[in-house]
Image (cartoon, rainbow, N blue to C red):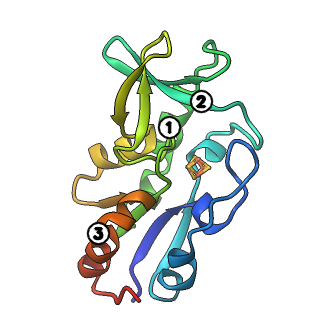
């Protein structure tokens, strides 16, 4: 049985980013696709935000981190993103690992920029979906494409018992 790996749909070449583009990852498409069953995941499309859609970023609001519009801070998509993550739990519980898109306010794994309500940078954190995965499935290996390039590829393949080239 091949391992099941959830993958950000934009890394699989699907044009689902906020601006209607994709970010295909050649290693995932050319190597990993032959060794694992890849399950496309796009939190923002799944949450009904559409393509194209207004860009959002992460903002620290009190004790909470929320996904707010970059151009229109009144746009708050936090609840639909969290609801979609919870609805997907039955599927997520079947996965052996997840690879997400770096820097995304939904998918980045420690690589999503965080801001103050006034727009000042506050450092990096995880996107809302990546955070949900690590909190709800603590044993699940969750990487983003940036981490893949920093030793994550070898770690993933070793943990799943597959070759990486
Ligand atoms: S980074 Fe995540 S939310 Fe954004 S387009 Fe890719 S899969 Fe969808």
Q: Which residue is mark 1?
A: 105
Q: Element type at marker 2?
A: strand
- Cβ at disc 3 under 8 Å from ligand 1: no
Q: Element type at marker 3?
A: helix
* Crowd class of label 2 (few under 14; some 14 to 19; many from 20; radius 10 Å): many
Residues at marks 3 and 1 touching, judged by CB atoms closer than 8 Å = no
Q: Earlier in the sequence, mark 2 or mark 3?
A: 2
Q: Which residue is mark 2?
A: 56
Image quadrant containing the N terminus = bottom left
* Rendered location of residue 78, percent (x, y): 51, 27
Nearer to us: label 2 or label 3: 3
* Rendered location of residue 130, percent (x, y): 40, 46
* Crowd class of label 1 (few under 14; some 14 to 19; many from 20; radius 10 Å): many
- Cβ at disc 1 under 8 Å from ligand 1: yes
Q: Residue at left 27%, top 86%?
A: 161
* Rendered location of residue 39, percent (x, y): 53, 68
Whole-number angstrom distance, CA of label 2 to CA of label 1: 7 Å
Q: Residue at left 50%, top 64%?
A: 7
* Rendered location of residue 103, percent (x, y): 47, 44
Residues at marks 2 and 1 touching, judged by CB atoms closer than 8 Å = yes
Nearest the eye: 115 or 158: 115
Q: Which residue is mark 3?
A: 151
């Amino acid at each position: 049985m091949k391992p099941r790996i959830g993958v950000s749909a934009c890394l699989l070449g699907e044009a689902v980013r906020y601006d209607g583009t994709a970010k295909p990852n050649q290693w995932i498409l050319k190597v990993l696709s032959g060794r694992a069953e890849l399950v496309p995941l796009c939190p923002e499309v799944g949450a009904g935000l559409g393509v194209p859609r207004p860009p959002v970023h992460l903002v620290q609001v009190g004790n909470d981190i929320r996904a707010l519009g970059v151009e229109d801070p009144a746009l708050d998509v936090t609840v639909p993103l969290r609801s979609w993550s919870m609805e997907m739990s039955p599927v997520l519980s079947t996965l052996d690992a997840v690879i997400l898109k770096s820097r995304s306010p939904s998918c980045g794994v420690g690589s999503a920029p965080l801001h103050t309500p006034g727009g000042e940078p506050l450092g990096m954190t995880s996107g809302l979906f990546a955070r949900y995965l690590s909190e709800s499935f603590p044993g699940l290996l969750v990487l983003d494409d940036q981490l893949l390039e920093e030793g994550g590829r070898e770690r993933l393949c070793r943990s799943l018992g597959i070759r990486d080239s």
